[in-house]
Amino acid sequence: MIDLNSSMVFSGTCTKYLAEEICRSLGCPLGKMVMTKFSDGEFAVSYEQSIRGRDVFLVQSTFPSSDNLMELLLMIDAAKRASAKTINAVIPYFGWARQDRKDKPRVSLGAKLVADLLMAAGIDRVITMDLHADQIQGFFDVPVDHLYASGVIMPYLQSLNLEDMVIASPDMGGSKRANTYAKYLGCPLVLCNKTRARANVVGSMQVIGDVKDKNVIIIDDMVDTAGTITKAADIMKEAGAKSVRACASHCVMSGPATQRVMDSALEEIVFTNSIPYTKDCPKVKQLSVADMFAETIRRVLENKSISDQYLM
């Protein structure tokens, strides 16, 4: 149980479900905050209790729309002006992270811009999970506690007790993440070589490795339109896979994603609850990361290491 005299947890509008779980795990109430909305779409934040001299933890994923990011920035600004001792941004899903490098001329770096905005607003620390690219941690000039969804996904995979398991990456960029799972579980690794026709559209894909009569688990950090992961699943099933499942940290699932998953060879797709999923799809399963974030908050307050939480 955290010291209520020195710390408080607050939540943005769209991540309240997760903040409430975190507070239950910590044994503390969720702080009271009011979001006032105006008819033109503008909104304002105000805390309904004193936070002077407190360590404040603000829980908010920055998934679309951009209102979620703006809401977090206003929460940070209000906390700074209310004389909070420290302001800790708990961002289970860090949006805009796919814009992490200049892969062609004259493009924006959205991840760096968001990091700059958060620091300008006044954060003292970021607690996040499974960034799209590890180097985003270096965009910040404040401490970043980077958690891994493997802490909840790995026990679930082990509970399935699947024989002839194979770990797969849907593209070459995710090979490092998939290889870590494969090493921990002691099973082979399969890769997919993918080309894109344009953003969110897969051009071609080939499987590198043997999946015949295997139970395949595709590992990724996020699923947006589900084009890549469903195409990979279908190709592996055609190549003789016994079953195909997918695990990803963040459930973006935009546009045609739900229908694609329903129509695909996937038996199930497992996410964490870093982003709420409200559509009806029996193949989608979400695992809670509330206890993991609660334990990290507890260790931050007690100045303890968080590294021994990691399974890999």
Image (spheres, grey):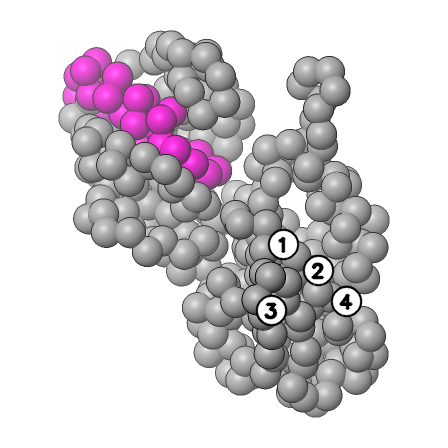
Q: Which residue is mark 1?
A: 69
Residue 143 position, x and y percent, is 77, 54
Q: Is residue 227 magenta?
A: yes
Magenta stretch in the rendered image: 212-240
Q: The residue under label 4 is which amino acid type? A: Asp
Residue 261 position, x and y percent, is 26, 35
- Alpha-carbon span between mark 2 and mark 1: 6 Å
First in sequence: mark 2 vs mark 3:
3
Say whether residue 181 is visible.
Answer: no
Q: Secondary structure at mark 1?
A: helix
Residue 40 position, x and y percent, is 60, 61
Q: Which residue is mark 4?
A: 77
Q: The residue under label 2 is which amino acid type? A: Leu
The numbered dot on residue 38 is 3
Please report contact status of discs 2 and 3: CB closer than 8 Å, yes or no: no
The numbered dot on residue 73 is 2
- Alpha-carbon span between mark 2 and mark 3: 17 Å
Q: The residue under label 1 is which amino acid type? A: Leu
Q: Pointer 2: residues within 10 angstroms few (<14), some, or many (20+)?
A: many
Please report contact status of discs 2 and 1: CB closer than 8 Å, yes or no: yes
Q: Nearer the viewer, residue 68 or 240?
A: 68
Write the residue at 57% across / 66% down. 39
Q: Secondary structure at mark 2?
A: helix
- Alpha-carbon span between mark 1 and mark 4: 12 Å
Q: Pointer 3: residues within 10 angstroms few (<14), some, or many (20+)?
A: few
Q: Is residue 210 above or below residue 74?
A: above
Please report contact status of discs 2 and 4: CB closer than 8 Å, yes or no: yes
